[in-house]
Image (cartoon, rainbow, N blue to C red):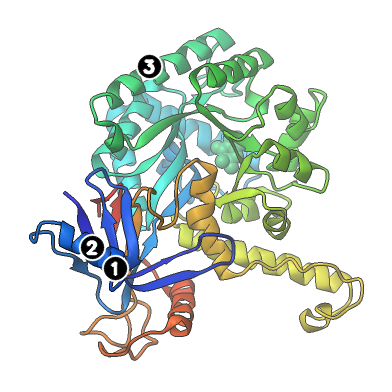
Amino acid sequence: MTQLFVGTFIDTPSAGELRIRSDHLLAISPEGYISHLAPLHSDSSQLLLSSLPTSTIPTEIPPHSFFLPSFTDLHLHAPQYLFNGTGLDLPLLEWLERYAYKAEERIDGSRELAERVYERLVRRLLDNGTGCVSFFGSIGVESNLILAKKMQELGLRGFIGKLSMDQSPRPTYGESSASSSLQSIAQFLDSLESYLSTYPSHERLVQPIITPRFIPVCSDELLVGLQKLAKQRDVRIQSHMCEGRDQMDMVMKRGKRDHEYWDELGFLGPKTLQAHVTYLDEEMIPLVKDRQVTMAHCPLSNAYLSEKQFPLREAIDNSLSVGLGTDIAGGYSPSIQTQMRQAVIISRMREGARCESMNCSFAESAHKEGAGNHLKVDWKESLYLATRGGKKGMGLGGCFEVGMEFDAQLIELANKDTPTGTGALDLFDLTSDTKLDDDSWTENLERWWCVGDERNRKGMWVQGRKVA
Ligand code: GUN
Ligand code: FE
């Protein structure tokens, strides 16, 4: 059945552009796609309303609530939720061996544990406004299928990367050869396809993504095989690229810089997602742009595990494809809202360092001759990355346009019983007859962006279905 909503719809069609549509009518097709979006009093909306059975009644969004596209998390290690928030004082490679590989091994060793951890994770993500995720799983086929089932059942969209790694430093957790690793990924692709075939195509929320963990744990034979498989089966690819010094040094010992290694093996293309890329520089930008690689910026994780911070301002200015990632458990917060804030904070710290290096203040830098471009990113740009930016990179929608999947969150700023604001937002005085114009929506939205939380989220929809 067609669903109808009337009220305010806010999205970010491009970086920095905030689109506020009040008094609009949105229709969702029975398959979960947006089939109409126009002012309520327009001819097209009135025509639509008159053509539908009178039993199709629009749901009115209350005056100080709005629909926003749900968030997309482009990088999250699902099994690492088991030890999330542990040991982040360690350097990356030590942290992987002390915690990450062990946790993944435990998940692969217990069906019951995988069910428990993945169910909690999926619920937590939906509570936090995340409706689409690109997951790194573990090596085991079975536990990745458990994750797929939880996503289908609880209504989370996303990509599942069964890990491929035939050069693991941990004797009890790894794949014994390139050929057994390739067999295992083929088995995963087949099993997932067969599981999903029980759903009609618009209800299939999960896709596989081929996932060599990172170059240091993969042989050339495995990498070549995975690249071929991705082409043959037309499956997306994800990995880690240029995350930190030790990891890049390990690749250098094999004769090339990390990004060159990936590129020579044919891994960099429009269906490739690379996490971190904190060492993105002037030399790498044209390559990443030309190959149309999407990057997952994981600002909280990078602050702990990377020596360098991702040059987000430069990436946006060069129109590179970027979204946000939590990198659980490299970043401890499952919230993309936290990542938006962290991305802005890091950009401002980079700008502060730039000003200091020129011996001038923020204010002076705007007028200083030869100062070049600033490095700050603002909240609207971060909202784009969290919604449209991440989704676009994965071939999906991410804003409210006819034809896009309806993946949305309903956010309440205030309601008639609490006009001062909902949750941590006790900043307003919005009586139910206060009508917000675009400027006041923008101001209030920024306040929600800064201090809002789960209490403001009154519902989540994925593919038109209410899931939380
Ligand atoms: N590089 C390879 N594996 C990992 C991982 O699990 N987390 C992070 N942050 N980096 C990695
Ligand atoms: Fe990671």
Residue type at the position of mark 2: Leu
Q: CA distance from mark 1 to mark 2?
A: 6 Å
What residue does disc 2 label?
47
Q: CB of mark 1 within 8 Å of CB of mark 2?
A: yes
From what the image shows, is residue 428 above or below residue 327? below
For the residues labelled 3 and 1, say whether their Cβ atoms are less than 8 Å apart: no
> What SS does tag 3 mark?
helix
Residue beneath disc 3 = 190
**Ligand 2 found in image quarter:** top right
Can you tell which of label 3 and label 1 is closer to the viewer?
Answer: 1
- Which residue, as the protein is rendered here, is positioned at the far top? 179
Is residue 217 toward the left or the right of residue 261 in the image? left
Q: Residue at x 64, y 56 (%)?
A: 303
Decide which of tag 3 and tag 2 comes sooner along the chain: 2
Q: Nearer the viewer, residue 386 or 41?
A: 41
Residue 43: mark: 1
Q: Is residue 93 visible?
A: no
Q: Amino acid at mark 1?
A: Asp
In this orientation, which residue lies closer to the viewer: 57 or 133?
Answer: 57
- Observer-nearest of 369 and 436: 436
Give amino acid for label 3. Asp
Residue 141 visible? The answer is yes
Residue 366 in picture, x, y percent from top left = 80, 78
- Rendering coords of residue 118 (x, y %): 33, 39
Which structural element holds mark 2? helix
